[in-house]
Image (cartoon, rainbow, N blue to C red):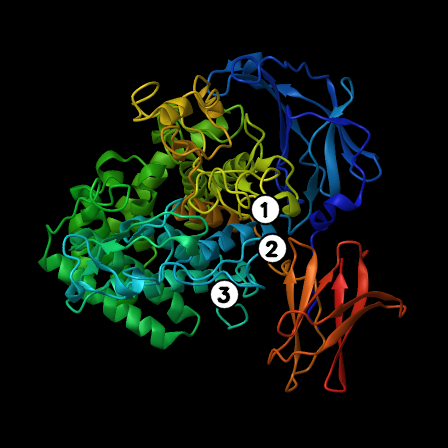
Amino acid sequence: MKKIIVLLFLAVNLFAAPPATTVEFIKVDQFGYKPNDEKIAVIANPITGYNNTTPFSPGTTYQVREWTTNIVVFTGSITPWNAGATQTQSGDKVWHFNFSSLTTPGSYYIFDVTNNVGSYRFEINTCVYNNVMKAAVRMFYYQRCGMAKAFPFADTGFVDGVCHKGTQQDTDCRLYNNTNVSTSKDLSGGWHDAGDYNKYVNFAYSPLIDMLLAYEYNPTVFSDDYNLPESGNGIPDLLDEVKYELDWFMKMQGNDSSLISVIGGGSASPNSADVAFRRYGPPTTAASLTGAAAFALAAIQFNAIGQTTYAASLQSRAIKAWHWANNHPNITFYNAGTLAAGEQQTSAYDTDMRKLGGAIYLYALTGNNFYRTYVDANVPNAHLIMWTYAYPFEAVEQDALLYYTKTPGATTAIRNQIINSYSVSMQTNNADNLPAHINKTDAYRAWMANNNYTWNSNQTKSKQGIMFLLMNQYNLNSANSTNYTNAASGFVHYMHGVNPNTKVYLSNMKKYGAENYVKQFYHSWFKDGSALWDEEGVSTYGPAPGYIPGGPNPSYSLASCCPSTCGSAANNALCLTNVTPPMGQPIQKSYKDFNNDWPVNSWEITEAGIYTNAAYVRMLSKFISTGCSTSTGLENNLTNTKNEARLYPNPTENKVFIQLSNKETGFSCKIFSVSGQLLAEGIDNNNGLIEINMEKMSAGIYFAEVSYNNTKQTIKFVKE
């Protein structure tokens, strides 16, 4: 019998808040901490920035208290950061409160005895991040192109029809500079890249590599129950999502084995409302090499789970794409200003590194010495080797190099050169790496240099966290293994609220346990002014859960036409939108939840992207525990029958959906407690589907009695 647990944070609203005023200057991971992990709360007094008009002077004694009982379980003192100096990056004076010795599972908050104020709630338990990671993975489901977001897979409020299959859209996509029907191709599928509906092969390189390596390095933490259409098919749902993108890559690969570079066009809310014509760019060397590398690494992973037929197809496509690019080394397409949005054409160096990465993954896949010879000849051209400098903006290249070091048959001298370069840079040769953690360079314990806070800094944060974890993954400095883990955890906690904005940088996460989280971000679906999907608490639903915005960006600015030359009085008036913050702030406070379009250009701060979520998922996966099937909260005792009743849980809504496998209508369901008390009753209203609200049900064992065709079946389930 398989027991499936619901984490305690699903019951956040079942208890009254503790008798203390919540203050945002006591910063904790708002999801929580694993029992044996390092736990350090950050207390801040804002000296400069948008919040310095409400200073905070912390007391000397801090406590950890149980959330429901208010019992004190830990007492300690706080330690000033950097002898009481104000950190320039955040504009804050900071103290640390270490309560790592508290390991008892439960729900807690930090309490300042002198000021009688407390922090947001957090949990301590082994499975504290499991549902959070699932929400971040499910972002890719909402980014799927050409697939309806259907119940019961879409969360309440986010059901939508099929997008981009209309006239001259993705099933009849045409070349950007020749729209004759002779150029028509079926290029449907894949993920929308970010807040727009464009699809780029090159921009999918980093997210695919991150997701594939996340699985390879942590296969047991990715289950098959993320409530995706493919859930239950025997393939981990993370790889199901990867496959959805790879299947689109296959459509982008032509008969000559090259890969088309980009698809662009359109913007509407919701996705299915977009009727703009869609156009594609030509094949390029870089896109073909991106495909080769992704296909090759994916073939390794799908072989590992027994999907050998699919893996063989991936391998064949990888080989052909790499060799096409090798024979056509200088085919480029610069799309900016012509098609789609961001410039997807890579630099000559980046193209070379994709070729090297493809060769590394192909050698690991095939063992063909042709690829090893190419790798050995070209590794010295990588910046990691040339500069002995590891940093997050070249993380995907560093991933490939490190992968080679564990590949059987790798040339020893080249292997050692890679390991030495990476290890030296992580340990001593880059002050942003281990020295930053040891020296406590960042008051918020997730250091990045000033110049690394650019567009999409949240992706860079996760990439930096991954770099620390790779030191342990490859066992490159065992003496500092705990330091590397703790350093990476600081980046996790930063994403979960331990930052100057006390912001959980994931959207719509209240039902996952967070209290101060992203409530709006730039996205064509969840756009400014939408009655349904704009800001949470203002619109009906707010944005879908689990999206990660770009993050603090001190380079943000209004469009250059502001304040008076934006084409109309109405556009000029938009220049008066309050953008302080993010402008005029310390670096880490250069953030605001907003989703205004041009000329306010909120995308420079809050646009979400597949690459940002993928990096975060990979980083967080190292802190996920196995044996935590947190997505259902149910224990199904049914045996297979012709009309088996199935459970479709929605933990974020605290509901259960019960459906017959053949969608037969005309059945009913009753929920009983273990004592036989009738608690809820449902009647079919949706093609054989019954919805049961579990929100007010206390923890315990329950039974669902399903009746149809004069037949009854009983499902036993557990809510904990």
Instruction: Look at mark 2 in the image and give the residue it sits on.
Output: 156
Image vertical order of residue 88 relative to residue 328, above or below: above
The amino acid type, in three-letter code, at marker 2 is Thr
Would residue 584 be found to the left or right of residue 15 on screen?
left
Residue at left offset 23%, top offset 46%: 339
Front of the two marks 3 and 1:
1
- Sequence-wise, the earlier of marks 3 and 1 is 3
Instruction: Look at mark 3 in the image and give the residue it sits on.
Output: 236
Residue at left offset 82%, top offset 56%: 698
Would residue 719 be found to the left or right of residue 149 on screen?
right
Q: x%, y% of residue 407?
A: 32, 59
Front of the two marks 3 and 2:
2
Q: Nearer the viewer, residue 575 or 396?
A: 575
Q: Residue furthest front?
A: 569
Would residue 533 be found to the left or right of residue 179 on screen?
right
Residue at left offset 66%, top offset 86%: 641
- Sequence-wise, the earlier of marks 2 and 1 is 2
Alpha carbons under labels 2 and 1: distance apart: 8 Å
Q: In the picture, which quadrant includes the C terminus?
A: bottom right
Image vertical order of residue 594 relative to residue 652, above or below: above
The amino acid type, in three-letter code, at marker 3 is Pro
Alpha carbons under labels 3 and 1: distance apart: 29 Å
Instruction: Look at mark 1 in the image and give the residue it sits on.
Output: 541
Q: x%, y% of residue 560?
A: 30, 23
Q: Classify 10 Å Cα crowding around label 2: few (below 14), some (14-19), many (20 and above).
A: few
Q: Classify 10 Å Cα crowding around label 1: few (below 14), some (14-19), many (20 and above).
A: some
Q: Nearer the viewer, residue 395 or 659?
A: 659
- Locate residue 26: give its quadrant: top right
Query: Answer yes or no: do the residues labelled 2 and 1 have beta carbons within 8 Å?
Result: yes
Would residue 430 be found to the left or right of residue 175 on screen?
right
Residue 413 in sight here = no
Alpha carbons under labels 3 and 2: distance apart: 24 Å
